[in-house]
Amino acid sequence: MAAILLEEGEKVALMMGNEAIARGALEAGAQFVTAYPGTPSSEVLANLSRVASKAGIYVEWSTNEKVAFEAAYSAALAGLRSMTVMKHLGAHWILDPLAVAAITGVDAGLVIVSADDPHPHSSQSSVDTRFHGRIVNIPVVEPSDPAEAKDLIVWAMDLSEDMKTPVLFRYTAAVAHSKAPVRLGPLRLEKRKPNFPKDHPRLVSIAPHARANIPKLFERLERVEKVFEDEPFVQRFGPDSGVWGLITTGVPHNYAMDVLAAEGLLEKVPVLKLIGQYPIPEEPVLDFLRSVDKVVVLEELEPFLEDQVIRIAELNGVGVEVYGKNTGHLPRYGEYSPELVGRVLSDLFDVNYPALTLTTLDEVSSSVGRRIPQMCAGCPHRGSYLSIKAAFARLGVDGLVFGDRGCYNQGSNPPLDAIDTCIAMGSSIAMAAAAKKAGETRPVVAVIGDSTFFHGGLPALVNAVVNRAPIVVAVFDNRWTCMTGHQPSPTSGVNAIGDQAPVLKPEDVAKAFQIPFVRVLSPYNLKAAEEAVVEAIRSAESSGLPAVLVFRAECTLQVLRRLRKKGLRPRPMTVNPSACVGCKECIKTGCPALGFDEELNKAFIYGGKCTGCTICAQVCPTGAIVREG
Amino acid sequence: MASAKVDEVNVVLAGVGGQGVVVASDALGLAAMKAGLNVRIANVHGLAQREGSVYSHVRMGSAVYSPKIPPGRANAVVGFEMSEAARHLRLLKPDDGILVVNNALMYPLAHFTGHVRYPGREDLLEVLESRLEPERIYVIDAASLAIRAGNPRTVNVVMLGALSATGVIPIGPDELVEAVKARVPKFALEENERAFWMGYNEVSRGETT
Ligand code: SF4
Ligand code: SF4
């Protein structure tokens, strides 16, 4: 599908939000694009990286979001239009340099794309990143669907360059992963030459310089507000006035339009859509508030617009009633849906939205249990967790396992139930070390994937060494950033555009940090791995320093993909029913290629799913699991 | 066959990771766009590779704004797997929405470990059939048809063929086949085309159970 990104001429294409943002970058003249992968944002750079060489633009998967932001900022100072892409959690990492960039401003356009996950579908928190823009005082914009997302990247880039300020482009999961027809615009493939300014009073942002430059930031904001007063940043729908009005932004705008259309209210209810949200354009908002008696504000997560609307009404003595999160009609958390917006508007408008009638079909739906995600069949992490658990069992201890962010957090699900925490990128090592320093007597293991290790684990590992924390750090090195779709990691040996790169090894890092016990092992050999974990625990205790284990095996999906390309298949395992005693030990490994026949009281293996990794065979007490054929 | 004025037609496609739900929804969306219809698609596929539920909402027509189908407004639920079909039944139009379902039940591992209990295949089928009049439910052995088409991975396209034959969507079968061919790998064109017509014929000949 990447071919569409470079197509010229009049054309409408069915595009995912993230793909549309990638196309938007190419129409906006973005010449330097960085990202760290994170659902729901990853497909933006994944798509761009496929056409980057052809388009003559620079793209990179950066080590983490702070690095990604600083790289794009630097390029924008040098005069190249730049963009950086991340999920909301990553946007938390960039606040420190972003606050300074807001003060120094930029020389060329710089758009920060932040994907929020209000549900959340695949995140540990759901903070509204519009506030990041507000805290540092840069413009905040938000699109409501893929087509608008593409156009808004262009508008935001132009705005950024005209006003010399970074712009925060916030969008949500429902826009990122939905698809809609997108009308392609002209490509703008810039070939600017960089010229990094030597401008000390601005770019050497020591306190006296910062004090001198901070007022300029607010002057810029005032100019931005003027721009936000007009289309396309503000849009009006429906009649000029009404009893009820809606102020909307993002995907809730379209949920509202669905409800109005279904109720025949499109011609009765005026709607003000705010694409430019900070600074809020007071004039059009005030006009709108004066044209209605009551207004509902629809936005996902915090009352970001709503609070500003209430302030504007108050200060100008407009007696409009404002409904939303402050009145308890709408929630401050969770993803909105047509159902939710329909229910709220039906209640307030006193109409009956037909979709809300519950039927007996609901019962059927709610009777189906959730599909608990598991690590894939043949996943190396399964062996790593089993060996850590086996080592604890052998030592007769109830050890603590601090987990981290990646596929391996599925190890928290039953039946493995193998980790005790899962907080933020890199937290495992810092928290594990602290547990020991606080006096924890049980063995403590930190589990962290290779990409996460380089993203956020390094400072914590240094901290654990210099403060002498006797923990085991288990790096699950499977060569890719898998959870988000197998982007390259520092351990991959390739970069975003497929160029060869050095393969970085966590064990080399550990040795350079003077960690005395460093061992590389295979997760597929359970006995040897269990032995290594036991030794590592003992070493940490005797040396008073961290011990590092690198569980190394490439992600199974990547291995299978390569096999499939060669027309090959793995040789699966199979259960010999006459030897199986029905103990279910194999099932407890959590491999989804296994099943159990209650009637026969025998385990079985789905041949099409099994990768032949042998982990289940190693735990079967009767040797019932053997290679097929 | 594409009618000039279509207000709103909503289809839910639901299955588990690896069944090709997203490819099928893309094909349906592309065909609708070709037929001049406004289209919105919502995909939830967060953990597709990790044994999770995958579903897609495909909305077509001039009165469609958002990508998500409100409960009770789906013209069809197409279940690539029985429990996933049941999970999305609440979206079906209570009076005349139809269910097209593959008669396979894929237990999650947690069912075998006893952490989640899924119903038996016959029991689930009975529940589905008890809630919908016979003319509103099409049960298909898509796995066998896919194998007969030459590739067990074409279950998704068998299901699209079956959906097409129900007459619920405002797109002709030939147009839908073309969209399928534009979306599947080049080396698998023939088996996918066969798979489509196998699903189509199964419904149009009334051979569903
Ligand atoms: S060998 Fe066992 S554990 Fe490994 S993939 Fe096959 S069934 Fe799963
Ligand atoms: S571990 Fe071996 S004996 Fe026990 S259920 Fe599995 S295959 Fe059967």
Image (cartoon, coloured by chain):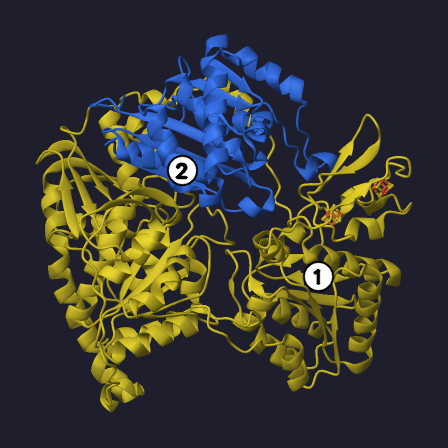
Chain colours: A yellow, B blue
Residue at 58 percent of width and 66 percent of height? A427
Q: Secondary structure at mark 2?
A: helix
- Residue B104 spot, x, y in % from top left: 61, 26
Residue A440: name its quadrant.
bottom right
Say whether residue A440 is left or right of residue A269.
right
Residue behind mark 1: A401
Residue at 19 percent of width and 59 percent of height? A155
- Residue A192 spot, x, y in % from top left: 22, 77
Residue at 44 percent of width and 19 percent of height? A358
Subunit of label 1: A
Q: Secondary structure at mark 1?
A: strand
Say whether residue A32 is left or right of residue A219.
right
Residue behind mark 2: B181
- Residue A126 spot, x, y in % from top left: 44, 52
Neighbourhood count class around disc 2 (C-alpha, 10 Å): few under 14, some 14–19, many 20 upward: some
- Residue A178 spot, x, y in % from top left: 36, 43
Under mark 1, the amino acid is Val
